[in-house]
Image: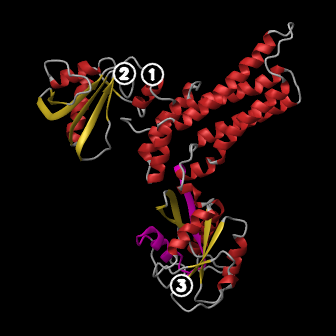
Amino acid sequence: MFRTDDTIVAIATPPGRGGIGVVRISGPRSHQVVEALTRHGRPFEPRYATLAEVRGPSGTVDRAVVTVFIAPHSYTGEDVAEISAHGSPVILQGIVVEALRLGARLAEPGEFTLRAYLNGRIDLIQAEAVRDLVEAVTPLQARAAFDQLEGTLTEEIRRIDRALLDLCARLEASLDFPAEGYHFVNENRAADEIAAIAHDAAGLLADARRGGMIRDGVQVVLAGRPNSGKSSLFNRLAGAGRAIVTDTPGTTRDLITERIDIDGVPVTLVDTAGVREHPSDPIEVEGIARATAAHQVAAVVLVVLDGAAPITGDDRALLRRTEGATRLIAVNKSDLPAAWPLDEAGADAIRISALTGWGTDELRRGILSALGGTEVQREIPAVTNVRHRDLLARAHEALLRGRDAAAAELPEEFVLADLNEARALLEEMTGARTPDDLLAVIFASFCIGK
């Protein structure tokens, strides 16, 4: 996967038909391959779009726009050629097959971005941001990914690392001249400097949970007794009739999911079987068991109560069972006369009508608040990737150990061991030192052509 001395080719646009499709070629022979493909008769002018006929063994395949880039001024840092042809899968596959015949190799998933990383065009954080940007399904996800692609997180990590390097150099210098009694930093000063660096790392970590929520999404599970209006509310929030709604108790037997966007946060809604103490048949028993399991792993349990009917023992049992979870209570059927006062459900209960949609905007805001606050839509978090969060958290712990060692006036060797560990973890974030097997895992999740 890490061979970079050959020439690769792949379709860079999504599968299926479209107005335009792009075939990308990268490597030392990319320009020769595209010239043979088009039989243009002369080299293409770099960074200049040129209309040309793309030919195969049996004649003209298509008329396309060809653009070539000279290393290192390209996406991959190598010589690159891009052919923008009509977006027929047959045409695009024909161009790829002909490029393979001319000596190119089919690219592995993510190999173009991998070469950009290996050639120093981007770091590993930016490479992962490329994947996140391609996979973004909400505007906030796209903004967060583009922010990382621009290098804002990279620069912050490098700023922390530069401060660490400077401190490590002075501690190392103190070790190099023990007999002469030189100390380029005393223990108290070192402890203060490490504490300041650890504070900066903690600042990045503070937004990591919200960043992960934006990147990976969250699961909100609807819970309630049969006929409380769960499925109607599910359909209302999803904006489509995904769940079957009838007056017959126990209609919903299995988990039904739908991805929605709440102010840029991707939320997976899960409709579950109505929970009651005495189910009618084995299928409903299994549905309730699945519902209970879903409640336990949800980021938020949305308990739906029927406000137009008296509270039952099943309602109270569900409220007790979900008491320890992150929970939001929706009192449904507010379009009908209320059968009991709202405060009986709790101080934070929200009245809604799944039938008319009344109160569902407030419910959406309540879901965001239960997830950790509406601040999530006001700023782009720097740390979104779980790999980054883990490495940064471990680096922060190493810094705290180093601070404590310096404060306890332990020898410089002990302090340096912790600081060097923190530096290694930060460098693993950016890819300055990253094992090949980790790179293989990261880039294998990319699409082919990117």
Name which residue lies at 16% across and 25% down. Answer: 38
Q: Quadrant of the N terminus?
A: top left
- 224 part of magenta stretch: yes
Residue 44 screen position, x and y as percent: 20, 22
Disc 2 designates what residue?
A: 78
Q: Determine whether, in the image, residue 105 is placed left or right of residue 142.
A: left
Which residue of the protein is positioned furthest toward the top in this rendering? 179
**Circle 3 crowding by C-alpha within 10 Å: few under 14, some 14–19, many from 20:** many
> The residue tagged with tag 3: helix, strand or loop?
loop
Name which residue lies at 62% across and 79% down. Answer: 279
Which residue of the protein is positioned furthest toward the left in this rendering? 59
Label whose residue precedes the other's in the sequence (2 or 1): 2
Under mark 1, the amino acid is Asn
**Circle 2 crowding by C-alpha within 10 Å: few under 14, some 14–19, many from 20:** many
> The residue tagged with tag 1: helix, strand or loop?
loop
Name which residue lies at 58% across and 43% down. Answer: 383
Q: Is residue 161 above or below residue 310?
A: above
- Whether residues under marks 2 and 1 lie with C-beta atoms below 8 angstroms apart, the answer is yes
Label whose residue precedes the other's in the sequence (3 or 2): 2
Please report the bounds of the magenta region as a residue range: 215-242
- Whether residues under marks 3 and 1 lie with C-beta atoms below 8 angstroms apart, the answer is no
The one of 67 and 176 positioned closer to us in this rendering: 176
Residue 43 screen position, x and y as percent: 19, 18
